[in-house]
Image (cartoon, helix red, strand yellow):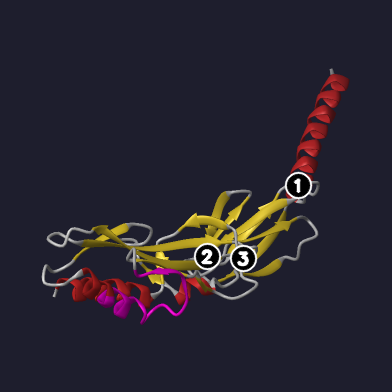
Amino acid sequence: MDAQRHNCFGTHFLQLATVALLITVSSGCTHTVKIIPTPATSEILLDQNVAGQGVTSVKLKSKHLKYELTVVPPPGYFTKRTMLDFDSPKSIHVAAPKDHSYYDTVEGADVCNKWITLKVAKRYSDTEAWRKVMSSVSKAIADFETLDEKSLYLKSAWRVAGKRGDILRTRCRIIVAVEDPDPDSMTYKFRIESERIDARGDMIEKIPRTFRDYLDALETTRQRLIK
């Protein structure tokens, strides 16, 4: 009986020791990295899972894996991604690259990439209306890709916002054409095209931001045609 008790005690002790060892090993198999982002309000994601906002500590659970850290900044900056592993420093400063296009442009969701109809007062001939269009648009546009007075059509060259080396840049242009040529109900259509482009100049997506003077050109044209 004493031998049996001894064996039971030994087995129980061994089990407790094993559990304690596992806990010790487990607690030592994590690596915590403190992320200090710029801008300070950036959201922090680890392998696409939200870990926090601003200064955030993330835990890496396996020394055999690499983890994707994503810093999602507020508007005006580009998302920054980097890889973490057990060799990563315990504290990392991650600065999101600045999006210069954002600060060179303004919001234009109501008009960007849409055809806007502009009415022409009946007292203006097509020639007079065209002159008013050109007078308004030429204040914002220096270069034209197409300028046809006969067909009353113009298309500006692309104007690019941002700096060379930016991950993405923004380009915009203005297109104006006659929508209804009838002198009694003449209208023009005005379009501001705005796109995101990559470093090669290829279009990535349409966006609702443009240059302030493009919006001013639209409003000035609208007012001059109707008065």
Say whether residue 140 is left or right of residue 120. right
Q: Amino acid at mark 2?
A: Pro
According to the image, label 3 marks what residue?
Answer: 167
In this rendering, the label closer to the viewer, 1 or 2? 2
Residue 21, label in figure? none
Task: Tell me the quarter of the image containing the N terminus.
Answer: top right
Q: Quadrant of residue 130?
A: bottom left
Task: Name above or below for residue 44 compared with residue 220.
Answer: above
Residue that sits furthest to the top in the current view? 1
Circle 1 sits in a helix, a strand or a loop, which is it? loop
Query: In front: mark 2 or mark 3?
Result: 3
Above/below status of 179 relative to 140: above
Q: Residue at x 80, y 42 (%)?
A: 21
Provide the secondary structure element on which disc 3 rests.
loop
Which region of the structure is painted magenta? 131-149
Residue 4 position in % (x across, y down):
85, 19
Q: Residue furthest right?
A: 3
Q: Which residue is mark 1?
A: 62
What's the amino acid at mark 3? Ile
Which corner quadrant of the image does residue 3 belong to? Answer: top right
Answer with left or right where residue 202 lies relative to residue 9: left
Residue 188 or 115: which is nearer the viewer?
A: 188
Q: Earlier in the sequence, mark 3 or mark 1?
A: 1
Q: Are marks 3 and 1 in contact (CB under 8 Å)?
A: no
Q: Give coordinates of residue 100: x percent, y percent.
A: 53, 74
Checking the image for residue 73, the label placed there is 2
- Closest to the camera, between mark 3 and mark 1, is 3
